[in-house]
Structures are given as structure tokens and as C-alpha cells.
Image (cartoon, rainbow, N blue to C red):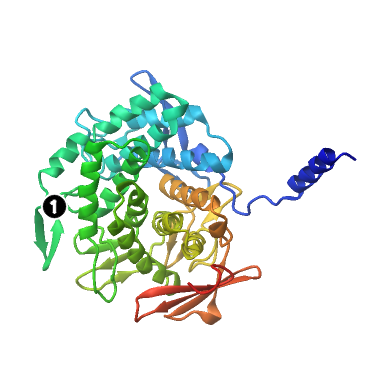
């Protein structure tokens, strides 16, 4: 047999015996949630907001509508992230999702959020009215991601997205007039030039979109605003607190896991802005999130009272932790961050208080969360998209994906140490209270890190 023929046979044999991923990114339920509509004669795709067990039919959000920019923008980011894992993307669906985002943008750069059952914009609802708010931040994340994706593939469509993204400069200029003003609340100074004045969580979601644009275009005007927004986010980081040491507050006096994308955003922007303060702050905040891999996830902490809430655990919480770790791994090449990204994402695959997966790879459903009574088996847009986005990102990093499906070893669990196992592999996380840092050792990292 010729060498080339033998090599080809070996490659075919390896392909036939290669195991598919245990937790594949299944977009079937997302596709089920999608609906094709027309607005002003233009075909668009929306994502229906709720889907409840047991039949998982579409459900409307009372008083809000049937679909929103929040979820459609998330779907855009997911499809682009999953394209590498899936090998392709449904270009028609992606474009039509982006068309909906474009349709919900106002000429002043603000966004409406919801449409009602008759496809009219809900312009008056508190979660939908025109504003530069959470849904606008996510709208710009989608536009920035779409622009980067189509920049070489379809320059004409990319420029349409870029023109829409550039409208953010209008509300950003208004925020810039508040720099460097602060407000004192309960003895602490907070920046006033973030989205909603002090919303570091919404600001971090916008920065994820800005990072996509700046990664390919060094826009000086956008850079100016991004630097100031980053400065404001850094000012929201807590120092020397028994519960919140190094955490980024979401808004004055409050930390919550959902939307807490500061680690992910600042780490993405670090190589663009060449500012080591961003990376250092993200690494410090990662220790706060890492400690929860030992003590258990937290959904909410009140700065003044110290009140802590553990439930609900939702995919939106899991994403912000896992992908923050993942970006730190990419920025530093330190494998401990990849391990922690995989362990954080393993909450979706069973390493949680319920002991059951929140993700069903057969249907593509990501359940709506866990509370004190157990798993909520509804599977709406936010949960599905945030969970799949997390899994798609983790699938790209072998040092992280190997820990999907890991389970905590209860025999080692205490306030300072916890081990996780997956098959024969074992990793142990140990909290060092003196240095306020996590040590990772076991079957990873070439030893303790």
C-alpha cells in the first residue's frame, strides 16, 4: 500500500472513531423559538421570549410583548460564536436577526426593546421605552459583533451595521458631559458617566460590542469614550470588604451575577487599550468569582447589609463567570483560568445544587434555572441563548471543555477547599484567605497555580 493511501486510511479511521462532544451545542430549541415576521415590508427574525414546560410552546410576556432586542441581540452573538463550533451559520437567519436589531434603533442612537403580538413597538413600557439602557447595550453588542463578522464576508452589509453602531456616539457624548462627576451614596463615591449614570453591568455589556469594533478598527472617537467608560467601571470595584473584596458592583450598593460582564469586557479591551490596569482589575475580580466555585454560586450581595442570596442560579449568571475566566485564559495563557471556566460552565452540565444538568443536549433546551425547590424546567430565550453561548465559547478551548460534566467531590467540600472530578481526572481548588486568592492543582496546570 502506498504511503499516501495508508495515511488516508488512518485519517478516515481516526475520524470514524473520534468521539463527538458530550455536550454539543444544539441550536434546535433556539430555532424553535425563532419566528419569521415582517416590519414595514422587511423580513426579520425575532426570538419568542418564553417557552414553558411541558409542551414548550411560545408564551407572551404580559405587558411587555412577544420578543425583544435583549434576546435577539443575544442570539446574534450566539450564532456568530457558534459558527466555529458548528462549522457554519444560517446566514439568512443571522441577517434577519440583525435586521430586527436595526429596526428597533432610533435615529438618536437609543433603542426600543419589545414588540407586541401585532408587531408594533412597545414604546411606553418600562422595559421597552426608547433609551440608552440594557437593551441598547446589547443591541450595540450585536451590531459590533455583526460588523466584525461581515466586514470581509459582505462589506456592504457590514457598513450598514457600522453606521448603525456609530449612532452610539450620540448618547455616549451626553454621558461624557458628566465626566468626571461622582455621587456619594452611603459613604461611597460612584461615577456618573456610565450607562444609567452608575450601571456598570449595562456598561460592560456595551463594552463587549465596542471591543468587537475596536478589534478591527482603531476608531479614535470610540476609543475616547471606551477609555472613560472603563475608568468608570474600575471605580465600581470594591476594595477590602469581607464579602465583596475585588468584586465589580453592578450598581450602587449591589453586586449581582447576571449582567456582571466586567471581567469579560475589560479583559477583551486590555490588548486594544494596552492598559494593564484593566487586566489587573479583571484578574483580581476573578478571584472573587473563583471563590464561589468553592463556596457555591451567589446571585446577589448587598454591600451595606451583607445580605447574600444564592438563588436563583440562571444561565445568565453562569455565562458572566465562565466567560470572564475564559477571556483571562486567552489573555494570560494561564491554564487555571481555563479550568475555572470549564468548572463554572459545568453548572450547566450538572455541577450545581440540583445535581442535574440545566442543559439538555438532545433538545437544545437550557432550563430557566434552579431555586430552593429545584430546577425550573421552562426554557425561555434568555436561558437558552446564554447557556448555549457559554457552551459554544468553552467548546473552543480544550483546557476548559475537558471539565464540562465535572461533579463536585462532596468529601472534600468545605469553606476553603473543593475538589471536582470528571472520569479519572481530578482538580482541587483551595482558597488562600491570607492572599485572598485561589490555588488550583491536580490534573491540570502543570502543578499548583
Image side of residue 137 versus residue 25, left or right: left
User: Can see residue 67?
Assistant: no
User: In which quadrant of the rendered image does the N terminus lie?
Assistant: top right
Q: Residue at left 13%, top 40%?
A: 174
Q: Residue at left 54%, top 50%?
A: 396
Q: Secondary structure at mark 1?
A: loop
Q: For the image shown, how many numbered marks are present on the structure?
A: 1
Rendering quarter of residue 217: top left
Residue density around tag 1, few if under 14, some if 14–19, many if 20 or more, within 10 Å? many
Q: Residue at left 50%, top 67%?
A: 354
Query: Disc 1 marks which residue?
Result: 192
Query: x%, y% of residue 45?
Result: 43, 30
Rendering quarter of residue 84: top right
Against 276, residue 27 (above or below) is: above
Query: x%, y% of residue 261?
Result: 34, 54
User: Can see residue 232?
Assistant: yes
Q: Residue at left 30%, top 62%?
A: 281
354, 69: nearer the viewer:
69
Against 415, residue 219 (above or below) is: above
230, 291: nearer the viewer:
230
Pick out the residue farthest to the right.
1
Query: x%, y% of residue 414?
Result: 46, 81
Image side of residue 22 versus residue 114, left or right: right
Query: x%, y% of residue 100?
Result: 36, 30
Amino acid at each position: 500500500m502506498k504511503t499516501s493511501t495508508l495515511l488516508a486510511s488512518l485519517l478516515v479511521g481516526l475520524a470514524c472513531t473520534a468521539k463527538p462532544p458530550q455536550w454539543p451545542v444544539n441550536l434546535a430549541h433556539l430555532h424553535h423559538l425563532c419566528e419569521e415576521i415582517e416590519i414595514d415590508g422587511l423580513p426579520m427574525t425575532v426570538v419568542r421570549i418564553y417557552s414553558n414546560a411541558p409542551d414548550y410552546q411560545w408564551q407572551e410576556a404580559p405587558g411587555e410583548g412577544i420578543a425583544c432586542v435583549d434576546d435577539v441581540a443575544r442570539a446574534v452573538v450566539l450564532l456568530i460564536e457558534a459558527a466555529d463550533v458548528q462549522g457554519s451559520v444560517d446566514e439568512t437567519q443571522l441577517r434577519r436577526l440583525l435586521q430586527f436589531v436595526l429596526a428597533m434603533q432610533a435615529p438618536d442612537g437609543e433603542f426600543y426593546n419589545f414588540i407586541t403580538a401585532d408587531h408594533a413597538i412597545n414604546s411606553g413600557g418600562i422595559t421597552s421605552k426608547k433609551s440608552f439602557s440594557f437593551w441598547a447595550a446589547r443591541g450595540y453588542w450585536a451590531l459590533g459583533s455583526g460588523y466584525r463578522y461581515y466586514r470581509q464576508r459582505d462589506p456592504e452589509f457590514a457598513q450598514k451595521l457600522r453606521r448603525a453602531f456609530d449612532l452610539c456616539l450620540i448618547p455616549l457624548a451626553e454621558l461624557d458631559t458628566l465626566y468626571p462627576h461622582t455621587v456619594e451614596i452611603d459613604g461611597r463615591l460612584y461615577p456618573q458617566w456610565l450607562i444609567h449614570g452608575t450601571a456598570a453591568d449595562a456598561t460592560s455589556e456595551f463594552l463587549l460590542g465596542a471591543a468587537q469594533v475596536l478589534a478591527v478598527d482603531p476608531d479614535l472617537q470610540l476609543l475616547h469614550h471606551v477609555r472613560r467608560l472603563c475608568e468608570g467601571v474600575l471605580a465600581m470595584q470594591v476594595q477590602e470588604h469581607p464579602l465583596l473584596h475585588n468584586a465589580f458592583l453592578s450598581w450602587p450598593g449591589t453586586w449581582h451575577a447576571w449582567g456582571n460582564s466586567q471581567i469579560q469586557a475589560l479583559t477583551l479591551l486590555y490588548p486594544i487599550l494596552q492598559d494593564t490596569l484593566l487586566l489587573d482589575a479583571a484578574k483580581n475580580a476573578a478571584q472573587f468569582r473563583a471563590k464561589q466555585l468553592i463556596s457555591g454560586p451567589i446571585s446577589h450581595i448587598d454591600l451595606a447589609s451583607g445580605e447574600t442570596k444564592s438563588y436563583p442560579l440562571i444561565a445568565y449568571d453562569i455565562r458572566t463567570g465562565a466567560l470572564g475566566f475564559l477571556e483571562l485564559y486567552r489573555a494570560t495563557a494561564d491554564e487555571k483560568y481555563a479550568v475555572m471556566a470549564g468548572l463554572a460552565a459545568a453548572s450547566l452540565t450538572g455541577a450545581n445544587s440540583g445535581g442535574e444538568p440545566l442543559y439538555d443536549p438532545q433538545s437544545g433546551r437550557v432550563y430557566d434555572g434552579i431555586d430552593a425547590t429545584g430546577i425550573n424546567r421552562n426554557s425561555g430565550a434568555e436561558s437558552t441563548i446564554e447557556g448555549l453561548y457559554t457552551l459554544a465559547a468553552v467548546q473552543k478551548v480544550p483546557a476548559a471543555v475537558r471539565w464540562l460534566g465535572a461533579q463536585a467531590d462532596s468529601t472534600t467540600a468545605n469553606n476553603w477547599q473543593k475538589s471536582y472530578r470528571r472520569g479519572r481526572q481530578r482538580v482541587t481548588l483551595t482558597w488562600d484567605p491570607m492572599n485572598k486568592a485561589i490555588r488550583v492543582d491536580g490534573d491540570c496546570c502543570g502543578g499548583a497555580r
